[in-house]
Image: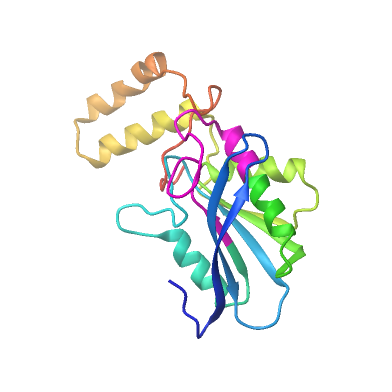
């Protein structure tokens, strides 16, 4: 996918998981010209996401990496654990697990000569918008974080709101969508990914 007239390299790299001992696969997109470069790690939203965060034929993370690389910013994006070429089990992973995967990705970047560690940040989308502040709270050397549609409510409230909006968008009777909230609040099972804060759906404006 590399446009060699604009970027010197788009490399496939393996990252070693911090705690789980898994291998994460990703693409590091490096701008053309002399480095080191400001660098951004992209953290995906909920659901099994590949490195491009492919959804409904769109690849928003590929677009972001391309746009930023054309403007001198290196970008790393990875397949979620258990997705694409990454190892591990997606189904049993929690938000905390994905945070440790992101920490492994940051360690990978800090070891790269192309990366300006004084200008290293993360961008989190949807559930990634939960993970990015977790990383910043534990890692004072991060220069910045960017949140895209990060949830502002707790997990149950976010899921309930999303379900109601999906039902309204699909044209169900108003009485049905208005009754759904309390029923869902009583019956919502704990999420295996994060029992205290179930993951919001990917690509939604949480």
- Of 193 and 147, nearer the camera is 193
Is 77 magenta? The answer is: yes
- Of 25 and 52, nearer the camera is 25
Work out whether 184 lies above or below 12. above
In the rendered structure, the answer to whether residue 167 lies left or right of residue 187 reads left
Give the residue at the far top of this rendering: 186
Question: Which range of residues does the magenta coloring cover?
Answer: 76-101
Work out whether 158 lies above or below 140. above
- Of 58 and 49, nearer the camera is 49
Is 79 magenta? The answer is: yes
Q: Quadrant of the N terminus?
A: bottom left
Rendered residue at 57%/59% (across/down): 13
Rendered image coloring scheme: rainbow
Query: Whole-percent x and y of residue 104?
Result: 66, 47
Rendered residue at 31%/23% (across/down): 180
Give the quadrant of residue 95: top right
Query: Whole-percent x and y of residue 10?
Result: 53, 70
Rendered residue at 30%/53% (across/down): 56
């Amino acid at each position: 996918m590399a446009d060699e007239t604009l970027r010197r390299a788009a490399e496939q790299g393996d990252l070693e998981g911090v705690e789980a001992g898994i291998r994460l696969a990703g693409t590091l997109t490096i701008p053309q010209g002399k480095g080191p470069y400001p660098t951004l790690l992209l953290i995906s939203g909920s659901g099994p996401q590949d490195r491009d965060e492919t959804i409904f034929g769109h690849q928003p993370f590929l677009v972001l990496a391309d746009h930023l690389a054309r403007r001198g910013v290196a970008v790393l994006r990875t397949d979620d654990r258990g997705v694409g070429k990454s190892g591990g089990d997606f189904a049993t992973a929690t938000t905390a697990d994905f945070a440790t995967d992101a920490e492994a990705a940051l360690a990978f970047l800090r070891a790269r000569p192309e990366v300006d560690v004084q200008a290293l940040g993360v961008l989190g989308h949807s559930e990634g918008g939960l993970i990015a502040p977790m990383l910043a709270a534990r890692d004072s050397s991060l220069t910045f974080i960017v949140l895209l549609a990060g949830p502002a409510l707790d997990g149950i409230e976010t899921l309930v709101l999303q379900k109601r909006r999906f039902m309204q968008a699909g044209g169900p009777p108003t009485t049905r969508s208005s009754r759904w909230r309390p029923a869902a609040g009583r019956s919502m099972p704990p999420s295996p990914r994060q029992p205290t804060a179930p993951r919001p759906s990917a690509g939604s404006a949480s």
